[in-house]
Image (cartoon, coloured by chain):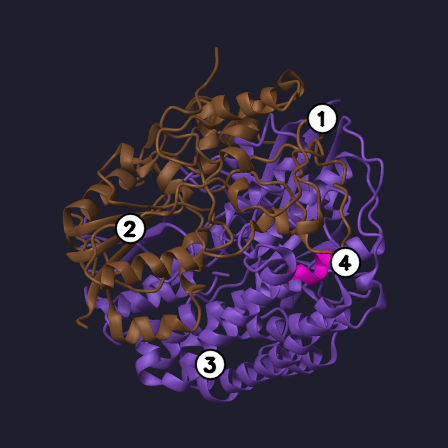
Chain colours: A purple, B brown
Amino acid sequence: MGKILNIAPVSRIEGHASVTIQLDDNGNVEDARLHVLSLRGFEKFVVGRPIEEVCRIVNRICGICPWQHHLASNKAADECLGVTLPPTGRKLRELCQMLAYIPDKILHFYFLAAPDFVLGPDADYSVRNVVGIVGAAPDLAKKVVHMRYKSQMMLEKFAGKVIHPMAAVVGGFSKPMLEEERKELLEGIKEFKDFAMFTMKFAREDVFPKYLDAVQTLGVFPSGYIGTVDSDGALQLYDGKLRLMDANGKYDDFKYNEYQDYIGEHIEDWSYLKFPYAKKWGNLKLDENDPVGVYRSNCLARINVCDKMATPLAQEELEIFRKSFGRPAHQTLLYNWARLIELVYCAERAEELLNDPEITGRDIRAKNIEPKAGEGVGCVEAPRGTLIHHYKTDENGMCTMANLIVGTTHNNAAMNLSVKQAAKAVIKNGVYDQGILNRIEMAVRAYDP
Amino acid sequence: MAKVTVAEEWLNSCSGCEIAILNIGDVLVDLLVNNLDFVHIPVIMDHKYYGQTGEGTEMNIPEAVVGIVSGSVRNEEHVAIAKEMRKKCQILIALGTCATDGGIPALINMYTNDELNQFVYKDSPTTDAGEPPTKNIPALLDKCYALDEIVDVDIYLPGCPPHPDWITAAVLALLDGKTEFAMPEKSVCDTCPTIKKGKKGLPDIKRMLETPEFDPDKPIDDMRCLLEQGFLCMGPVTRAGCGGKSGKPRCISARMPCRGCYGPIRKGAKPIVDYMGALASNGFDASTVPDRRGYMARFCGAHNMLKKLG
């Protein structure tokens, strides 16, 4: 048996993982795995907490997508307690989610992924990062840092906290939006719509074309996809039905509370993270040439499963994307492209919501909410994919069970296949260096927020 | 000013602290260009523990003047990283409440690892039951620890997440040649402008299933103290600072009670004991509070503050 390479930590991702690559005697890849190294146990320690408090605990699952966990949790708690939201409460939640998406997308594209594309995958590790981008394109870097910061502060100013929020509550929202807040946000969001279009065009015309061969070779394999769509089949992030599409493009739509009929979770003894799989397609098979049960989440999945985008500029971008790559598109690096189509959508959707007269309504929360025994499944789309929060409560409204399947978890099987496929594609006959190994990490990075 | 070398690591964490670092804002670019020289920071930089081609056998993090660690300590690799950071860094900063007090993940200290594994790998309704994984992954410790239970810490910057004001203030102090920095030992109530009328005729304890009374068109200075309205608010036993150097408490600004995310006001304080005392002295019947530990030690379960009962 040949050498084992231990790439640790996998970097420029949000989270803790390592990759081990097992080489054979000839220096070719026998196997490669992505290990998720941490288990915090949210499912266990929210049990015993009052259900309305859980949304203030599970936001800590992820510092990049705390809003999405906060909202999925509130939706599950609404259902446990049988509460219906007033329209304004619902719209404020969705608006916050759109505003929370914008800095994520900017962060990922410019800070985490761009070093590989702008500086190149072979650049030395000491410059292949956001500091290197500052050196290579200082004006753009300043603009990006400023825009990301501004988008975070817009949401923070309205909702109190942008990281680990508390402003959504069971039954609705904690405070109404004032007219002057609406005007200020609307002013801001127009700037972000322009910035989103600038980024989309810059990436589409200047960045991605240089790496089309990498796109066609790194981490490419057929898989299924999961995402959320509305009754017209348009991509949704806050609410809708789940759509699970197979590798050939056939799909099932189902309600949140039917998720157990479609998704199972498999255990491997080398990762704390479980491996969700599509139950109806057979038992999970982690073979990059003939995968079974493997589906992916996150932006590329959402772009693949949707029939259309609900806003005009994003729809134009979807058409350009589909013309080049078809549906479903299986190239892992296209996550970076799909991410920016969603950035455009989020800016457009936020603008729509801010122009909706109901957004400043004062009826923001359901009344007379009582603790009671119940069960609820709440889902939203987080940057990394569909969040499924499934809770049960007792007659005092205390949480008695929590089953969570979150963005990254859906992608566990796919990330492993991408790593294996990429490792086999780039390491040949014992030849590898840091740039080559970085290409394997690029296949992991693509799945990040 | 010479550049200061910095190494950053995250342990049992969510990355919110790292996002808080980015939220320093426009100054960040100048700091990165002129003042800070990151030698290791996995969230944005590709330095590897075992060499850039993964062939080394011993973990190596470069030497740095300043070390920043977020997250609590939950597995054997976290211990190794914490020790390596301590060894290589002159000044070690515990960033965020997970590192300073255990944070949200220390709620697990109310349960055993066996109970955790039982749900995650056996009882979960979607899981094909099996044994907990053990290969090529670091073993869990018996519980969740704060950073200073494993290595000595020089500077504490709590918060979930820490406000960028405090991160900037600490960095600037260190750039100025100082080796110490401490946040003020004040309570959230000390910085909260809501109206306190005193103890008479206080209502029963309420859960957040109800909505506090406030006039949305007026600032929180015009709202009655949420605790006096009967909502559990951890302000009396929580360190101030969530609004930054001059801002108002952030959750209360959104008309929501404090949950204690900056941890105890000072090292060694016992928020559960202190808060029960505060409730009693305000005339509340503390026995009516459900899940007392889950409210009062929500962010500070390390240091033996939360344990498995019975």
- Alpha carbon distance from label 3 to label 1: 54 Å
- Alpha carbon distance from label 2 to label 1: 41 Å
Specify the principal SS of the magenta part.
Answer: helix
Residue type, numbered disc 3: Lys
Q: Chain of mark 4?
A: B
- Alpha carbon distance from label 4 to label 2: 39 Å
- Alpha carbon distance from label 1 to label 4: 27 Å
Nearer the viewer's eye, disc 2 or disc 1? 1
What residue does disc 2 label?
B181
Vertical relation: B247 (above or below) A98: above
Which residue is drawn at the image coordinates 73% and 37% (left, top)?
A376
Kindly indicate whether the residues beneath marks 3 and 1 are on one polypeptide chain: no
What residue does disc 1 label?
B200
Q: SS of the residue at dot 1?
A: loop
What residue does disc 3 label?
A143
Vertical relation: B117 (above or below) A340: above
Mark earlier in primary sequence (4, 2): 2
- Alpha carbon distance from label 3 to label 4: 34 Å
Q: SS of the residue at dot 3?
A: helix
